[in-house]
Image (cartoon, rainbow, N blue to C red):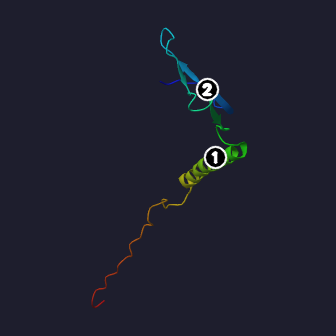
Amino acid sequence: MVGDIPLPDTSVGKIQYKAMLGTANGAFPFSYPTVEEGGNYYELSIPYRAAFGDAVLSILMFLVIATMVWGGLGFTLREMFSEDERILGMPEEIEPQPITILEKGK
């Protein structure tokens, strides 16, 4: 058996729960937790859960991502519109040296 409890993401504190189940005529009731397990109910502690961390870290994460995106765009545009003939990432082109052939007797 499963019993789902709808909890919002921002709930904090403790949930106390107990389950009771019985037959159709009520002759054989079942209780969870039982008296042997001690106590009338169970307690579930829910610690604080921040959805996106604290404000300082979320601003820092935004700044890092924005720097990478806009910095990459600026670098790409600079390379696209530069007048330099070399292509980024390609080896430099080696120009062939002219060879002069000397004839005998001249």
- Dot 1 alpha-carbon crowd within 10 angstroms: few under 14, some 14 to 19, many 20 or more: few
Q: Is residue 19 at all visible to an observer of this figure?
A: yes
Please state which of residues 67 and 57 is positioned toward the viewer in this rendering: 57
- What number of labels is visible? 2
Mark 2: amino acid = Tyr
Name the element at disc 1. helix
SS type, badge 2:
strand
Q: In the image, what residue occupies the spot 58% across and 51% down?
A: 72
* Position in image of residue 48 (x %, y %): 68, 38
Q: Is residue 84 above or below residue 35?
A: below
- Return the x and y of residue 13 as percentages of the image width and height: 69, 33
Mark 2 → mark 1, Cα distance in angstroms: 46 Å
Dot 1 corresponds to which residue? Answer: 66
Disc 2 or 1, which lies upstream in sequence? 2
Residue drawn at (60%, 32%) of the image: 38
Question: Type of residue at label 1?
Answer: Ala
Query: Is there a contact, CB below 8 Å, between mark 2 and mark 1?
Result: no
Write down the residue under mark 2: 17
- Which image quarter is the C terminus in? bottom left
**Disc sitting over residue 92 in the figure:** none
* Residue 15 percent location from the top left of the image: 65, 29
Q: Is residue 72 left or right of residue 11?
A: left
Residue 10 is at least partly visible in this image: no
Q: Residue 65 in the image: x percent, y percent?
A: 61, 47
Q: Looking at this view, name the residue that lies furthest to the top.
A: 25
Q: Is residue 73 above or below residue 45?
A: below
Nearer the observer, 57 or 87: 57
